[in-house]
Amino acid sequence: MAALALTSSFMVVEVVGGVVSGSLALIADAGHMLTDSASIFLALLAIWIAKKPVSADRTFGYNRTEILAAGVNALSLWAIAAWIVYESIHRLLDPPPIAGPTVLIVGSIGLAVNIAAAFILHRSSGHSLNVEGALQHVLADIMGSVAVIVSGGVIVIFKNVNNIGIVDPILSSLIALLIVYSSWGLVVQVFSVLIEATPSHIDVYKLCADIEDIPGVTVIHDVHAWTVTSGYVAFSAHVLADPEYEGDHDELLRKIRRIAKEDYGLSHITIQLETTVKGCTEDHHVDHLLQKQKKIEKRRRFAFGHN
């Protein structure tokens, strides 16, 4: 809430400053700060919605809401960047007069406000992709504020140079590029979650190998690992137990779950224990076995090459 109050209140100051000074950089930064406020509000709203209980209709509840909110934040950043570039082109053709001192003063205050907001959001960004999206907005705005300060400083120093106001739309375009660059990683993360890709921090090949090293396990197949929401990774697999295994199958399942939960931090674990693949119609992809075989062959070639 503190970050929301900071960004929304100073946005008004930047709008006034941009209109008075004629600076596109300030107006662009104000527009970006508007999305900062919207993204933080959206983050808070998504966190509140995600706390709603699960039901028979929504077995994972509303956890995915924060991912959708992060996606909206990222796309709104790109929309802002596109508008800034469009407006910059018009101003390059006809540079307006710019009040440099006003731009410099407002930009400096804006930098301080954005740094404070970023500090507040940083404490929670590591635990939520949604809050990370809001933080990316503010970090991009910090870079924007620096560009505004540079623009104002150049105009003040070289005020007698003809068409020096051209620096304002040029730096505004730079702000747009920085916005797109800073949000690219967030877009990739959101896309990976939505297509239910294996989380980057999970080595699924090693996970499968560790499970297959458990006495009584023959092979693991039909493996799926995906992110439901930030910090909540689901995992499902079919495990083929040795038909001659005489141990306790419940204990075998506990060992598998222990590895998945304690060693890999997986949250929602579903294991189907089988003694035969007969009647199992799911996709029996065993890519980890192919990967394991490739590693073995690579080690053999390396060993023979050094003998």
Image (cartoon, rainbow, N blue to C red):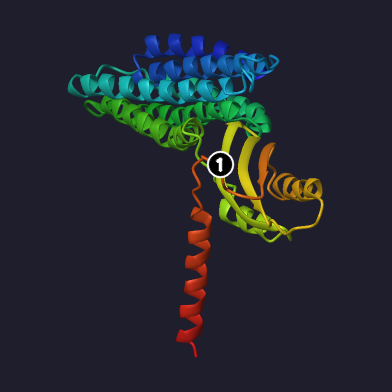
> In the image, is residue 191 above or below residue 11?
below
- Note whether residue 160 is visible: no
> In the image, is residue 93 above or below residue 242?
above
What residue is at 36 percent from the left and 17 percent from the top?
A: 99
Image coordinates for residue 77, horizontal then vertical, percent: 42, 24
**Residue 91 in the figure: left or right of residue 195:** left
What residue is at 47 percent from the left and 66 percent from the top?
A: 294
Write down the quadrant of residue 52 in the picture: top right
Closest to the observer: 242 or 283?
242
Looking at numbered disc 1 in the image, what kind of residue is underneath it?
Gly
Image coordinates for residue 307, horizontal then vertical, percent: 50, 91
What residue is at 39 percent from the left and 9 percent from the top?
A: 20
Mark 1 crowdedness (10 Å alpha carbons): few <14, some 14-19, many ≥20 = few
Closest to the observer: 245 or 76?
245
Residue lying at the far bottom of the rendered structure: 307
Mark 1 sits on what residue?
279
Question: Which type of secondary structure does the marked residue at label 1 adopt?
Answer: loop
Write down the quadrant of residue 265 in the picture: top right
Residue lying at the far left of the rendered structure: 93
> In the image, is residue 114 above or below residue 49?
below
Image quarter hosting the N terminus: top right
